[in-house]
Image: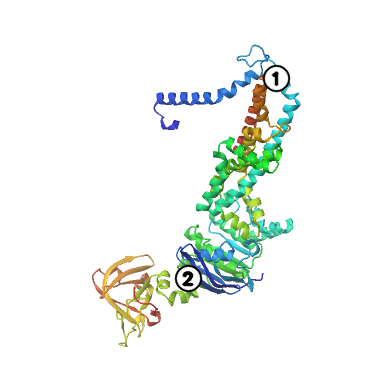
Amino acid sequence: MKSLPITIDSVSKAYGSYVALDDVSLDIQAGEFLTLLGPSGSGKTTLLMALAGFVRPDSGKLLLGDRDITRLAPNKRDIGIVFQNYALFPHMNVLANVAYPLALRNTPRAEARQRALATLARVKLDGLAERNIAALSGGQRQRVALARAIVFEPRVMLMDEPLSALDKNLRETMQYEIRRLHDDLGITTIYVTHDQREALIMSDRIAVMNAGRIQQIDTPQRIYDRPSTRFVAEFMGEANIVAPGSVRRVDGAEASRETLMIRAESFHLDAKLAGADAVALEGMLRAKAFRGENWLLTLALDGGQEVLVCIPAALAGGCAELAAGQRMTAYAPAAKVHAIAGAMA
Amino acid sequence: MLEAYPQNRFARIVLWSFAALVMAFLMLPTLVVVPLSFSASSLLEFPPHAYSLRWYENFFSSATWMAALRTSLILGTLTALIAVPFALLACISMNRLGGKTAASIQSVLLTPSVTPGILLAIGLFFVLAAQRLVGTLFGVLVGHVVLAVPVACIVLLPALARFDWNQVQAARSLGANWARAIGGIIVPQLRLSLLSATLMAFLTSLDESVISIFIASGRNSTMPKLMFLSLRDQIDPTIAAISTLWTAIVVVVVVIVALRQKS
């Protein structure tokens, strides 16, 4: 199966005065797994629907390979889509659902049946071909939707929060399976989610969106460790944005004068673990909470700012004895301290 | 309604009696023609003194009545065949447009159902006269379609509102053009509502008299038109026999559809 790159070139879309997409440009490589990540209303679904052909951009261009598809009808794009609610056809059984795109392409009946069955086996639904849609569990419906979207060998696959209706365990299983399916097929995939963990686990690259704009596009690790804006830092996890001047260097060197981002789990309570060039934050313990795999401490700095410190349970020997109101110091290795653009809010 | 008074026996009796009274009030005028139609007398008398089937024989042996029956059935069928697809497409577009645009289209489409029939008939007469279509079957058909479209829309709009539009988008993304998405995905799932809409459109045409009186010529009179005319010219129990048959046809069609919807 030959997959194609996608080029999104300065695409804008407004509904009245509401700007859903604000001059978005993005290059997706052939065979890449790219996630559009953002809160609701950030424009990620609008962008996906523009690629699918259900939203016509006000301006800008969409290229599939080197073909301009901006104004092409959805049924001529050859793009497989998995919808959030699966959108299976309840009046057809599983096999008919999966064979539907083949029937539309006038594939001979026997071949269509055989290809649909092979695709069902690929998503581990062997033996359910004759079932009614209503008789399937949520996870099985998800697999039927997947099978239907890949059976006609599209060159691109779009997925709109496909796992949001599943419970947590099933969701994690499906994350790995979708990613494995992508790797097997090598199909260019654009995946929409608001779940940052899901994005980190599944993606080659993540494009973080907010208010109709792409905030940052990068590998999961760089998005997490080196966010370029405060929004990305805070959206991706427990981030502390620390004002210049509230940290000191353990080795006595001059501390950075920039606004710093330090993730809660980057801290150590033991200075030795943080290294010689660590930065130190001093304050008063305001609250502590045991969360199973770790302790979450809330530290009030002398300037009044609160900092979240997350210590893994395995390293948190003394945490149970800490008392609120006591003075303490948290250390972060220099490599985990990241200067971000933009002033303090 | 009745479950609201589980303990109060008196209230239940009053309610049931009231409901029975309303039913009787609605049904009796229709049912009273049934014994009249089997009367042996040539006058409309109730109760009849002797019984016979002569008025049914009279109806079935009359070339005029048979022609009107044929006209009415053809008109009803054509009306349903034209009005229902039209209404379906209109409802789909209203469903997709939403908001004020859809509301204004809907008010235009539903106007014929709230306009007095006589006004519609007069207006239609002048429009058709200009096209030299007065007296043609086509002219009557236009009038009946205009009346049947709102009826079909009223049945189809709520059904479409419950329909999951993502399915159409899914079908489109999988390669279906509009025609195949509507025919393969929407129509099969709305088949019960479409059946109801077809029946309602058919009955709207079958039951329509005012437009038929204005537009239809003698050659292609509909049943209701001929019934009006025969009541004016001469009263004999043939009209009761026809009414009974008419009621029976409608009841049979409605019952069949109701049974199919249940299964």
* Side (left or right) of A15 relative to B234: left
Which corner quadrant of the image does residue A53 belong to?
Answer: bottom right
Report the front residue among A111 and B213: B213
**Badge 2 sits on which subunit?**
A
Which corner quadrant of the image does residue B70 belong to?
Answer: top right
Residue at image location 60% in from the left, 35% down from the top: B258
CA neighbours of label 2 inside 10 A, class few (<14), some (14 to 19), many (20+): many
Residue at image location 53% in from the left, 49% down from the top: B104
Q: Compared to A38, does B65 lie above or below?
A: above
Residue A296 in sight in this render:
yes
Which corner quadrant of the image does residue A244 belong to?
Answer: bottom left
- Give the percent coordinates (x, y) of residue B120: 59, 38
The circle drawn on residue B246 is none
- Give the percent coordinates (x, y) of residue B212: 66, 34
In this rendering, do the residues under marks 1 and 2 share a single chain? no
Protein image colouring: rainbow
Q: Compared to A332, does B152 lie above or below?
A: above
- Give the percent coordinates (x, y) of residue A101: 66, 58
- Residue identified by numbered label 1: B55
Amino acid identity at mark 1: Trp
The circle drawn on residue A213 is 2
Q: What is the residue that sits farthest to the bottom in this orientation?
A: A253
